[in-house]
Image (spheres, rainbow, N blue to C red):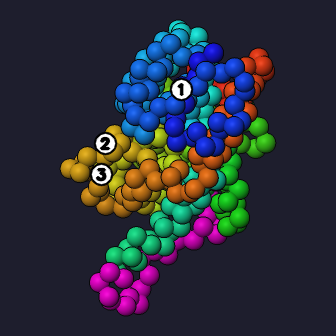
């Protein structure tokens, strides 16, 4: 059984691998492409989505693909389905830091701390605060109530905000997918933490933006495609909503000339939420070490993805 694994992870997992696995360690994309062609197991993450997809596509015999990433939108999931490749993702490895970033986004927006920083750069002492919103007793909608969404809800609730989430079943007082749009006008904060799927693409579009409170803010720590960016840019220019804190956008990286950089009341954090911590790779290595033993033994895998659903 051949496994292709990142050389960066070698110190973390080599001693924890089961006997009998033929391990090949890659350091470059080209090495990964060459090694993965006849591999059974691949942990072949590359930081550039297109390059990662290229490596995965080269793994025609992969029985199991492991990734540190939570989203698979860069990959051809139909190809993986056709090949019968099982996939496990990194759900949970950066959940806490992404949830913290979502709260950071809400606080930055509420107090307009982005403007506070710019004022400090001018060495001017203001006597008026640029942002006067409070999370206290505000109302928040969370779209995408998985691991990250639940953590966001817990943290926002600690500010005594009223939290409403969306689930498929409508369990425990949550809204069902066919109910939240009719209530968009009730919320001060709309948090996006959903995966990128055909169903979730542009879930916030022109109609949804028009239905929101004029003072409401969007905080997107999910995927850029969850929002129709052209509609968002128009809504922000026309002051239809309070603003948008965007950790994720489309495309990534955002080209320097893209209008979103200079759109009023758009605050961008360049998809740094998941990288703003030091434990992600260590947690991912632990999951991989558990899963490779489970895979060899024929036991269920942790974080296995439903490729048909996309998450």
Above-or-below relation of 259 to 177: below
Badge 2 marks a residue whose secondary structure is helix
At 35% from the left and 51% from the top, the residue drawn is 235
Q: Earlier in the sequence, mark 3 or mark 1?
A: 1
Do residues under tags 3 and 2 come within 8 Å of each other at their CB atoms?
Answer: no
Badge 3 marks a residue whose secondary structure is helix
- Residue 97 is tagged as none
Q: Magenta span has 106?
A: no
Q: Is residue 225 visible in the rendered structure shown here?
A: no
Secondary structure mostly taken by the magenta-highlighted segment of the chain? loop
Q: Earlier in the sequence, mark 2 or mark 1?
A: 1
Mark 3 and mark 2: Cα distance apart in space: 9 Å
Closer to the eye: label 3 or 1: 1
Other-residue count near label 3 (Cα within 10 Å), few / some / many at <14 / 14–19 / ≥20:
many
Residue labelled with disc 1: 24
Residue labelled with disc 3: 260
Above-or-below relation of 200 to 96: above
**Hey, which residue is sitting farthest left in the picture?**
257
Q: In this orientation, which residue lies closer to the viewer: 13 or 135?
A: 13
Other-residue count near label 1 (Cα within 10 Å), few / some / many at <14 / 14–19 / ≥20:
some
Badge 1 marks a residue whose secondary structure is strand
Mark 3 and mark 1: Cα distance apart in space: 42 Å
Residue labelled with disc 2: 230
Q: In this orientation, which residue lies closer to the viewer: 138 or 33?
A: 33
Q: Magenta residues? A: 120-139
Q: Residue 137: image x %, image y %?
A: 66, 67
The quarter of the rendered structure image containing the N terminus is top right
Query: Which of the 4 image quarters holds residue 252?
Result: top left
Q: Is 299 displayed left or right of 256 in the figure?
A: right
Q: How many marks?
A: 3
Query: Which of the 4 image quarters holds residue 143?
Result: top right
């Amino acid at each position: 059984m051949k496994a292709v694994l990142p050389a960066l992870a070698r110190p973390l997992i080599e001693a924890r691998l089961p006997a009998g696995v033929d391990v090949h360690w890659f350091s470059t994309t080209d090495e990964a492409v060459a090694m993965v062609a006849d591999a059974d197991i691949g942990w072949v993450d590359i930081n550039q989505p297109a390059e990662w997809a290229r490596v995965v596509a080269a793994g025609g015999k992969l029985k199991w693909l492991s990734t540190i990433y939570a989203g698979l939108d860069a990959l051809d999931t139909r190809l993986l389905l056709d090949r019968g490749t099982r996939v496990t993702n990194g759900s949970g490895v950066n959940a806490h830091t992404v949830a913290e970033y979502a709260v950071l986004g809400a606080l930055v927006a509420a107090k307009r701390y982005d403007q506070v920083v710019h004022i400090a750069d001018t060495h001017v002492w203001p006597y008026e605060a640029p942002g006067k919103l409070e999370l206290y007793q505000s109302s928040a909608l969370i779209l995408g109530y998985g691991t990250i969404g639940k953590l966001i809800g817990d943290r926002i609730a600690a500010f005594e905000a009223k939290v409403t989430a969306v689930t498929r079943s409508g369990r425990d007082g949550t809204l069902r997918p066919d109910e939240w749009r009719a209530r968009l006008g009730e919320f001060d904060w709309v948090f996006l933490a959903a995966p990128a799927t055909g169903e979730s693409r542009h879930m916030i579009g022109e109609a949804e933006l028009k239905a929101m409170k004029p003072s409401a803010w969007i905080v997107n720590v999910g995927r850029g495609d969850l929002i129709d960016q052209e509609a968002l840019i128009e809504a922000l220019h026309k002051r239809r909503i309070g603003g948008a804190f965007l950790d994720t956008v489309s495309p990534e990286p955002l080209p320097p000339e893209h209008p979103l950089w200079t759109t009023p009341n758009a605050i961008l954090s360049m998809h740094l939420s998941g990288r703003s911590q030091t434990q992600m790779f260590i947690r991912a290595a632990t999951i991989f070490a558990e899963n490779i033993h489970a895979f060899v033994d024929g036991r269920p895998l942790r974080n296995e993805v439903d490729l048909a659903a996309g998450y």
